[in-house]
Image: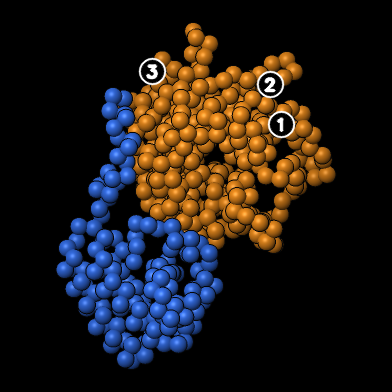
Chain colours: A orange, B blue
Amino acid sequence: MAAVASHQLAACITCHVWNADLSMVAICPNNNEVHIYKATPARDSVWEKVYTLQQHDQLISGIDWGPISNKIVTASHDRNSYVWTFEGEAWNPTLVILRLNRAAISVKWSPKENKFAVGSGAKVVCICYYETENNWWVSKIIRKKHSSTVTNVSWHPNNVVLATTSTDCKCRVFSVYIKGVDSRGDANTSFGEMKFGEQLFEVCDVFGWTFGVKWSPTGSMLAYVGHNSTICFVRVLGRTATPQVVTLQGLPLRDVLFLSENRLVAGGFDCYPLLFLGDNKGTWKLARCLDEHKQVVRHVKSGSQVCSLTISCSSPYRK
Amino acid sequence: MAEEGGRSGGGGGEDREDEDEDSEPVEAIINRIELKSRQVEWLLKSAQYAEALKTALDDSPTKTRDETCKSANWVVVHRVLMASKDTDALLSTLESEFYDILMKYIYRGLSTGDRPTCEQCLRLHEKLTEKAGMGCIVRALADKRHTV
């Protein structure tokens, strides 16, 4: 299977995200701006740049577009976030002071979009929520546990549990239940009683930097990739985690995406997506490559350019 | 939230302690390596190179931090790697589970700077990469915890 269409939007894309109905895509062309394109799946269509979001001072490293609220959140090396709201004809930014002393690396809206999480180079995770009385986004920080940069964050579908990957080679799962923001009912999860910032469990079966953590649609599985060319599937039952590590022939992966409970697509430095399938016993295997091998790899001049090949983290999920 | 500050700094050191997976005494490991060594000698004498390689790689002391264990096992592996010029035969029947560990030993061989060892390891490196792919190299280089 080859790509349906390809559009060269910039020489390098550091992060990208689709909107709810997949009619627009927001990208960062390796600078401090976000460009929003009108996108149509037709093969010969021309994607038109419709908005440019300018407010950050440095490279934008993370972006997410809430499908319910239609709000965009960006995170940047300038250590701040902006929440962008579409009003009238334009995107209006609201500054979120994350209280970080290192770059923000990744950002994700929670499933209910009342909170977002930011992973950073300061070895911490920020959980941000809106305080109506002060008309202000507040950042609550989890300082414990991480001993290196938090590369990625992923929300459990229950809205109160967060998984992180880090360059300290571990994958961790935290409670991010915030009293007063989340309802009492949300506190009642399969993880038992928990308070904000508590680590529920950690997985250390990968011996390299870890990236691209994702929960499966029901939250019973977790998958992340290691920079030592492995991918780890974790079956989660309460607070017990059963990991399965699959080693790869090729170069390391950067990101994963669950299509369903037993289908997962992963992409990385080999420049083509891989499909993994889980059988009914819960054992995962590489099924096949989803693109022609061709000479894609030959065109790649340096490692940094490949990083932009992280796969669309949202589109099929939200269809 | 009160103890937040203290923990983050000491993260690295703390890791070491709670993950000392191998509490096995050094003598026990050395004994096993000696046993293995005799087996390997016997296999090499009867020219069963592929089998000797598997035996040498099996149960390598990657988890311990004791350098004497690691060196002792390296001596056994090195003996097998240098035993035959025919690298294809050596690797032909090697199961994929041994690829990663062999790659680590090949890099150890290359780091010795000894000319015949390096030459042989380079030949093996090429052959193994054909079979195991780039992922194997990446794993050998990235794994700082389970060294050989």
Q: Which residue is drawn at the image coordinates 54% and 72% (left, top)?
A: B130
Indicate left or right for A25 with A200 as reference: right
Q: Quadrant of residue B110?
A: bottom left
Instruction: Report in which chain the residue with disc 1 lies.
Output: A
Residue A72 percent coordinates (x, y): 62, 26
* Separation of residues labelled 2 and 1 (CA atoms): 11 Å
Q: Position of residue A139 (x, y in %)?
A: 46, 22
Residue at (66% x, 56% y) in the render = A300
Quarter of the image where one finds residue A198: top left
Name the residue at the bottom extreme. Answer: B46
Q: Chain of mark 3?
A: A
Instruction: Check disc 2 and give the amino acid type.
Output: Trp
Disc number placed over residue A179 in the picture, else none: 3
Q: Nearer the viewer, residue B69 or B118?
A: B118
**Marks 1/3: CA–CA distance:** 35 Å
Task: Work out whether disc 2 and disc 3 sit on a shared chain.
Answer: yes
The residue pinned by badge 1 equals A36
Residue B44 seen from this side: yes
Measured in 3D between alpha carbons, the distance from the residue under mark 2 to the one under mark 3, in whole angstroms, is: 30 Å
Give the residue at mark 2. A91
In the rendered image, is residue A18 in sight? no
From this viewpoint, which residue is outermost toward the top?
A133
Q: Amino acid at mark 3?
A: Lys
- Write the residue at 41% across / 71% down: B111
User: Toward the viewer: B46 or A149?
Assistant: A149
Label 2 element class? strand
The location of residue A256, given as percent across then percent down, is 54, 46
